[in-house]
């Protein structure tokens, strides 16, 4: 399931600015809603070291991105959330309904935020073995060195890009769905189509990623899961959110 949450920024300033490292601010918003509307889910997600089987994205329409800030041209912000887990989807829905009933929520730098609406987004079930996805938020291919405990985020042109993305998927999905899914993940074919390199500043780090379209070929059940949990690493931190563009040559919007 996936949701579209329409947010409205309220500020006394004529020009609305938010920090370029916006991820932690929006994550605090989600956490606040969950902590009050679904405390058990909050504890499961954020008090335990578990993989986050969901993806998120924030859309700023017509915003101007500068080195340390984002200047909003309109007070409207779109928050996107996706997960294959029905219980988590219901918890997040209730979390944003709780925030909506608060009228306004303190945000950043004296700004307040209002949840205007929460609606579901319909996605047609994937039945074909080939799908084109649009990466709405940057896909991160995280190559983790266990010895040095350092991370490298690969460019989509890197020869290891596909294998690292597959390992990211196995790390996220196998604990929940069983090791058997590793076989189907390793047999996936990934083909970047119209990708663009991005560098995102978040949590005191710079993350190299990519947005654009990517073609995946594999088992339909797995493609449905990937669409819903997101592709790559750190999808719970507003990376790797996918829109389904077309499957089997037929456009699905």
Image (cartoon, rainbow, N blue to C red):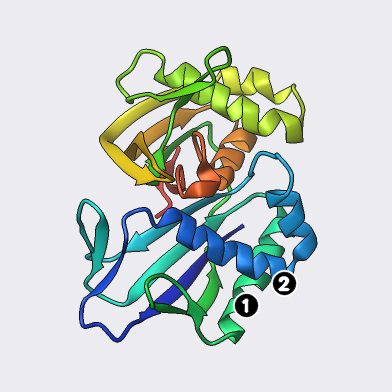
Q: Secondary structure at mark 2?
A: helix
| Residue to which mark 2 is pinned | 37
Residue at 58% x, 44% y is 229
| Residue to which mark 1 is pinned | 97
Q: Is residue 175 left or right of residue 3?
A: right
Q: Residues within 10 Å of mark 2 (few under 14, many from 20)?
A: many
| Number of marks in picture | 2
Viewer-nearest residue: 77 or 69: 69
Q: Where residue 93 appears, x then y in whole percent?
A: 64, 69
Locate the C terminus by quadrant. Answer: bottom left
Q: Where residue 245 appears, x then y in whole percent?
A: 40, 47
Q: Is residue 204 left or right of residue 64?
A: right
Residue at 53% x, 87% y is 103
Q: Is residue 221 above or below residue 99?
A: above
Q: Which mark is nearer the camera, 2 or 1?
A: 2
Q: Is residue 153 above or below residue 221?
A: above
Locate the N terminus by quadrant. Answer: bottom right
Q: Where residue 25 appears, x then y in whole percent?
A: 46, 61
Q: Residues within 10 Å of mark 1 (few under 14, many from 20)?
A: some
Q: CB of mark 2 within 8 Å of CB of mark 1?
A: yes
CA gap between label 2 and label 1 equals: 9 Å
Location of residue 69 by image quarter: bottom left
Viewer-nearest residue: 213 or 19: 19
Q: Residue furthest right?
A: 40
Residue at 28% x, 38% y is 198
Location of residue 211 by image quarter: top left
Residue at 48% x, 77% y is 106
- Residue 122 makes an appearance in the image: no
């Amino acid at each position: 399931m996936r949701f579209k949450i329409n947010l409205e920024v309220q500020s006394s300033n004529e020009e609305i600015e938010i920090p370029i490292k916006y991820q932690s601010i929006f994550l605090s918003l989600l956490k606040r809603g969950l902590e009050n509307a679904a405390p058990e889910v909050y504890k499961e997600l954020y008090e335990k070291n578990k993989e986050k089987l969901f993806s998120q994205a924030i859309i700023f329409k017509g915003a101007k991105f500068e080195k340390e800030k984002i200047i909003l041209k309109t007070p409207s912000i779109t928050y996107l959330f996706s997960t294959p887990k029905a219980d988590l989807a219901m918890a997040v829905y209730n979390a944003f309904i709780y925030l909506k009933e608060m009228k306004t929520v303190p945000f950043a730098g004296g700004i307040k935020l209002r949840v205007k609406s929460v609606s579901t987004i319909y996605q047609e079930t994937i039945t074909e073995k080939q799908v084109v996805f649009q990466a709405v938020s940057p896909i991160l291919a995280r190559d983790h060195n266990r010895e040095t405990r350092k991370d490298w985020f690969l460019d989509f042109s890197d020869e290891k890009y596909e294998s690292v993305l597959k390992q990211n998927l196995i790390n996220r999905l196998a604990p929940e769905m069983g090791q058997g899914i590793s076989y189907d993940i390793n047999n996936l074919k990934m083909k970047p189509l119209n990708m663009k390199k991005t560098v995102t500043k978040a949590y005191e780090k710079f993350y190299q990623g990519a947005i654009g379209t990517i073609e995946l070929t594999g088992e339909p059940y797995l493609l449905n899961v990937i669409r819903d949990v997101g592709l790559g690493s750190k999808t719970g931190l507003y990376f790797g959110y996918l829109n389904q563009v077309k499957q089997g040559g037929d456009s699905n919007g």
